[in-house]
Amino acid sequence: MTTAYTDTRGSISAIEGVYAPQEDSHLLIDVMDRSGLVPGRRVVDLCTGSGVVAIGAATQGAAEVLAFDICPRAVRCARANAAAAGAEVSVHLGSWTRAAEFGPFDLLVCNPPYVPHAPGEDTEEVAGPSWAWNAGRDGRLVLDPLCASAAELLVDGGTVLIVQSEFSGVESSLDALNGCGFIAEVVAEQQIPFGPVLSARAKWLERMGWLQNGRREEKLVVIRADKA
Ligand SMILES: C[S@@+](CC[C@H](N)C(=O)[O-])C[C@H]1O[C@@H](n2cnc3c(N)ncnc32)[C@H](O)[C@@H]1O
Protein backbone atom coordinates (compact mmCIF):
# COMPACT_ATOMS: atom_id res chain seq x y z
CA MET A 1 0.00 0.00 0.00
CA THR A 2 1.20 3.51 -0.77
CA THR A 3 0.07 6.60 1.10
CA ALA A 4 0.34 9.77 -0.96
CA TYR A 5 0.62 13.16 0.69
CA THR A 6 0.37 16.33 -1.34
CA ASP A 7 0.51 19.95 -0.33
CA THR A 8 1.66 23.21 -1.87
CA ARG A 9 5.26 21.99 -1.58
CA GLY A 10 4.64 18.98 -3.82
CA SER A 11 3.84 15.32 -3.58
CA ILE A 12 5.35 12.70 -1.27
CA SER A 13 4.55 8.99 -1.27
CA ALA A 14 5.08 6.68 1.67
CA ILE A 15 5.20 3.04 0.69
CA GLU A 16 3.95 0.40 3.11
CA GLY A 17 6.11 0.26 6.21
CA VAL A 18 7.31 3.87 5.87
CA TYR A 19 6.05 6.69 8.08
CA ALA A 20 3.67 8.84 6.05
CA PRO A 21 4.13 12.59 6.70
CA GLN A 22 1.96 13.71 9.61
CA GLU A 23 1.43 16.76 11.82
CA ASP A 24 4.90 16.43 13.35
CA SER A 25 6.53 16.36 9.91
CA HIS A 26 4.60 19.46 8.80
CA LEU A 27 5.31 21.37 12.01
CA LEU A 28 9.04 20.75 11.64
CA ILE A 29 9.05 21.77 7.97
CA ASP A 30 7.14 24.96 8.75
CA VAL A 31 9.53 25.93 11.55
CA MET A 32 12.50 25.14 9.32
CA ASP A 33 11.04 27.36 6.60
CA ARG A 34 10.26 30.25 8.97
CA SER A 35 13.70 30.05 10.61
CA GLY A 36 15.41 31.28 7.44
CA LEU A 37 18.28 28.93 8.31
CA VAL A 38 18.14 26.73 5.21
CA PRO A 39 19.13 28.76 2.13
CA GLY A 40 22.77 28.19 1.22
CA ARG A 41 23.39 25.91 4.21
CA ARG A 42 24.51 22.30 4.69
CA VAL A 43 21.55 20.44 6.18
CA VAL A 44 21.25 16.97 7.67
CA ASP A 45 17.88 15.27 8.20
CA LEU A 46 18.12 12.43 10.71
CA CYS A 47 15.39 9.73 10.71
CA THR A 48 14.21 10.83 7.28
CA GLY A 49 11.41 8.30 6.63
CA SER A 50 9.73 9.31 3.37
CA GLY A 51 12.30 12.10 3.01
CA VAL A 52 9.68 14.80 3.37
CA VAL A 53 11.75 17.06 5.65
CA ALA A 54 14.95 16.61 3.64
CA ILE A 55 13.08 17.38 0.42
CA GLY A 56 11.60 20.43 2.15
CA ALA A 57 15.13 21.61 2.97
CA ALA A 58 16.29 21.10 -0.62
CA THR A 59 13.24 22.98 -1.88
CA GLN A 60 13.93 25.81 0.56
CA GLY A 61 17.35 26.35 -1.02
CA ALA A 62 19.83 24.33 1.04
CA ALA A 63 23.32 24.13 -0.49
CA GLU A 64 23.45 20.41 0.31
CA VAL A 65 21.09 17.97 2.05
CA LEU A 66 22.01 14.62 3.53
CA ALA A 67 19.45 12.26 5.05
CA PHE A 68 19.71 9.08 7.14
CA ASP A 69 17.31 6.30 8.03
CA ILE A 70 17.86 2.92 9.60
CA CYS A 71 15.09 1.31 7.53
CA PRO A 72 15.97 0.17 3.97
CA ARG A 73 12.38 0.71 2.80
CA ALA A 74 12.47 4.30 4.05
CA VAL A 75 15.75 4.89 2.22
CA ARG A 76 14.30 3.55 -1.04
CA CYS A 77 11.17 5.62 -0.52
CA ALA A 78 13.07 8.83 0.30
CA ARG A 79 15.31 8.40 -2.74
CA ALA A 80 12.29 7.88 -4.99
CA ASN A 81 10.48 10.90 -3.53
CA ALA A 82 13.54 13.11 -3.90
CA ALA A 83 13.99 12.03 -7.52
CA ALA A 84 10.30 12.64 -8.25
CA ALA A 85 10.51 16.10 -6.67
CA GLY A 86 13.72 16.95 -8.53
CA ALA A 87 15.34 17.54 -5.13
CA GLU A 88 19.04 16.89 -4.54
CA VAL A 89 19.12 14.80 -1.39
CA SER A 90 21.81 12.28 -0.56
CA VAL A 91 19.98 9.53 1.33
CA HIS A 92 22.07 7.12 3.45
CA LEU A 93 21.08 3.82 5.01
CA GLY A 94 21.97 3.48 8.65
CA SER A 95 21.60 4.89 12.11
CA TRP A 96 21.52 8.65 12.52
CA THR A 97 24.90 8.29 14.25
CA ARG A 98 26.45 7.73 10.79
CA ALA A 99 25.97 11.44 10.12
CA ALA A 100 29.18 12.04 12.11
CA GLU A 101 31.12 10.62 9.14
CA PHE A 102 29.81 13.43 6.91
CA GLY A 103 29.70 16.45 9.22
CA PRO A 104 29.87 19.12 10.29
CA PHE A 105 26.52 20.60 9.26
CA ASP A 106 24.99 24.05 9.60
CA LEU A 107 21.50 22.75 10.39
CA LEU A 108 20.36 19.44 11.88
CA VAL A 109 16.65 18.58 11.61
CA CYS A 110 15.02 15.52 13.12
CA ASN A 111 11.61 13.98 13.64
CA PRO A 112 12.73 10.95 15.63
CA PRO A 113 10.73 8.06 17.05
CA TYR A 114 9.49 9.55 20.36
CA VAL A 115 6.39 7.65 21.49
CA PRO A 116 6.65 5.95 24.89
CA HIS A 117 5.35 2.44 25.19
CA ALA A 118 4.77 -0.18 27.81
CA PRO A 119 7.36 -2.98 27.77
CA GLY A 120 6.23 -5.77 25.45
CA GLU A 121 3.46 -3.70 23.94
CA ASP A 122 2.97 -3.99 20.21
CA THR A 123 0.66 -1.75 18.22
CA GLU A 124 1.85 -2.99 14.83
CA GLU A 125 -1.62 -4.23 13.96
CA VAL A 126 -3.11 -0.88 14.99
CA ALA A 127 -1.08 1.49 12.89
CA GLY A 128 1.82 0.00 10.94
CA PRO A 129 5.59 -0.04 11.43
CA SER A 130 6.13 0.58 15.13
CA TRP A 131 9.90 1.18 14.77
CA ALA A 132 9.04 4.53 13.20
CA TRP A 133 7.65 5.85 16.49
CA ASN A 134 8.36 3.48 19.41
CA ALA A 135 11.13 4.93 21.56
CA GLY A 136 11.27 2.96 24.77
CA ARG A 137 9.34 3.35 27.98
CA ASP A 138 10.06 7.09 28.26
CA GLY A 139 10.09 7.91 24.54
CA ARG A 140 13.75 8.96 24.70
CA LEU A 141 15.55 6.05 23.02
CA VAL A 142 16.76 8.34 20.20
CA LEU A 143 16.26 11.74 21.85
CA ASP A 144 18.75 11.15 24.70
CA PRO A 145 21.77 10.13 22.59
CA LEU A 146 20.85 12.66 19.92
CA CYS A 147 20.73 15.59 22.35
CA ALA A 148 24.00 14.40 23.90
CA SER A 149 25.92 14.29 20.63
CA ALA A 150 24.23 16.92 18.44
CA ALA A 151 26.99 19.46 19.11
CA GLU A 152 29.56 17.15 17.50
CA LEU A 153 27.55 17.11 14.26
CA LEU A 154 27.39 20.90 13.90
CA VAL A 155 29.65 23.81 13.03
CA ASP A 156 29.98 26.53 15.66
CA GLY A 157 26.86 28.67 15.31
CA GLY A 158 24.95 25.70 13.88
CA THR A 159 21.36 24.92 14.82
CA VAL A 160 19.26 21.90 15.77
CA LEU A 161 15.50 21.67 15.14
CA ILE A 162 13.82 18.65 16.75
CA VAL A 163 10.12 17.84 16.92
CA GLN A 164 8.81 15.73 19.77
CA SER A 165 5.79 15.08 21.96
CA GLU A 166 5.01 16.37 25.44
CA PHE A 167 4.99 12.68 26.44
CA SER A 168 8.69 12.22 25.71
CA GLY A 169 10.22 14.73 28.10
CA VAL A 170 10.51 18.19 26.55
CA GLU A 171 12.37 19.49 29.63
CA SER A 172 14.82 16.59 29.37
CA SER A 173 15.68 17.60 25.80
CA LEU A 174 16.03 21.27 26.75
CA ASP A 175 18.21 20.44 29.77
CA ALA A 176 20.41 18.05 27.78
CA LEU A 177 20.94 20.56 24.95
CA ASN A 178 21.46 23.54 27.27
CA GLY A 179 23.95 21.39 29.19
CA CYS A 180 26.18 20.72 26.22
CA GLY A 181 26.83 24.03 24.57
CA PHE A 182 23.45 25.02 23.12
CA ILE A 183 20.92 27.70 23.86
CA ALA A 184 17.70 25.73 23.50
CA GLU A 185 14.04 26.72 23.62
CA VAL A 186 10.64 25.61 22.40
CA VAL A 187 9.81 27.65 19.28
CA ALA A 188 6.55 26.03 18.15
CA GLU A 189 3.70 24.07 19.71
CA GLN A 190 0.67 22.32 18.28
CA GLN A 191 -2.15 20.42 19.95
CA ILE A 192 -3.35 17.44 17.96
CA PRO A 193 -5.96 14.77 18.65
CA PHE A 194 -4.68 11.29 19.51
CA GLY A 195 -4.06 9.07 16.49
CA PRO A 196 -4.37 5.28 16.61
CA VAL A 197 -1.05 4.69 18.40
CA LEU A 198 -1.65 7.00 21.37
CA SER A 199 -5.31 6.02 21.52
CA ALA A 200 -4.17 2.41 22.01
CA ARG A 201 -1.80 3.57 24.79
CA ALA A 202 -4.05 6.11 26.48
CA LYS A 203 -5.02 3.89 29.43
CA TRP A 204 -1.39 3.00 30.06
CA LEU A 205 -0.39 6.70 29.90
CA GLU A 206 -3.17 7.44 32.39
CA ARG A 207 -1.99 4.64 34.69
CA MET A 208 1.56 6.04 34.53
CA GLY A 209 0.21 9.44 35.55
CA TRP A 210 1.45 11.07 32.33
CA LEU A 211 -2.00 11.73 30.90
CA GLN A 212 -4.93 13.40 32.57
CA ASN A 213 -7.87 10.97 32.76
CA GLY A 214 -10.07 11.28 29.69
CA ARG A 215 -7.79 13.68 27.83
CA ARG A 216 -7.15 12.51 24.30
CA GLU A 217 -4.91 15.10 22.74
CA GLU A 218 -1.18 15.58 22.58
CA LYS A 219 1.04 18.63 22.40
CA LEU A 220 3.81 18.53 19.81
CA VAL A 221 6.72 20.92 20.19
CA VAL A 222 9.64 21.97 18.05
CA ILE A 223 12.84 22.67 19.97
CA ARG A 224 15.40 25.02 18.46
CA ALA A 225 18.91 24.81 19.86
CA ASP A 226 21.69 27.15 18.72
CA LYS A 227 25.27 26.08 19.26
CA ALA A 228 27.31 28.80 20.90
C1 LIG B 1 8.63 9.53 13.08
S1 LIG B 1 9.42 8.90 11.63
C2 LIG B 1 9.83 10.44 10.84
C3 LIG B 1 9.90 10.36 9.32
C4 LIG B 1 10.06 11.70 8.61
N1 LIG B 1 11.27 12.39 9.02
C5 LIG B 1 8.88 12.61 8.82
O1 LIG B 1 9.03 13.64 9.49
O2 LIG B 1 7.78 12.30 8.32
C6 LIG B 1 10.95 8.31 12.30
C7 LIG B 1 11.91 7.60 11.32
O3 LIG B 1 13.10 7.28 12.05
C8 LIG B 1 13.64 6.06 11.56
N2 LIG B 1 14.55 5.58 12.61
C9 LIG B 1 14.24 4.95 13.76
N3 LIG B 1 15.35 4.74 14.49
C10 LIG B 1 16.39 5.26 13.78
C11 LIG B 1 17.79 5.36 14.01
N4 LIG B 1 18.36 4.89 15.12
N5 LIG B 1 18.57 5.97 13.08
C12 LIG B 1 18.01 6.45 11.94
N6 LIG B 1 16.68 6.36 11.65
C13 LIG B 1 15.89 5.79 12.57
C14 LIG B 1 12.43 5.22 11.25
O4 LIG B 1 12.74 4.21 10.32
C15 LIG B 1 11.45 6.29 10.71
O5 LIG B 1 11.55 6.36 9.31
Image: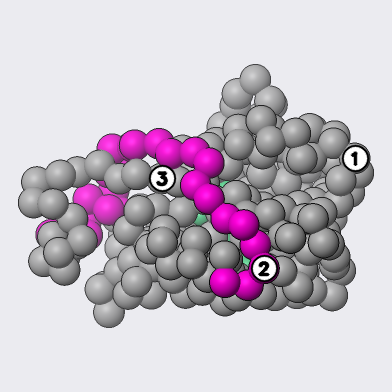
How busy is the neighbourhood of tag 3: few (under 14 within 10 Å), some, or many (20 plus)? Answer: many
Which image quarter: residue 103? Answer: bottom right
| Circle 3 residue | 220
The kind of residue on which mark 1 rests is: Gly
Looking at the image, is 208 positioned above or below residue 120? Answer: above
Q: CA distance from mark 3 to mark 2?
A: 24 Å
| Circle 1 residue | 40
The residue lying at 57 percent from left, 71 percent from top is 179
The kind of residue on which mark 2 rests is: Gly
**Residue 150 covered by magenta stretch:** no
Looking at the image, is 134 positioned above or below residue 66? Answer: below
| Circle 2 residue | 181
Q: Tag 1, which secondary structure?
A: loop
Q: Earlier in the sequence, mark 2 or mark 1?
A: 1
Give the magenta part as a residue range: 179-203
Q: Earlier in the sequence, mark 3 or mark 2?
A: 2
Tell me: 188 left or right of 77: left
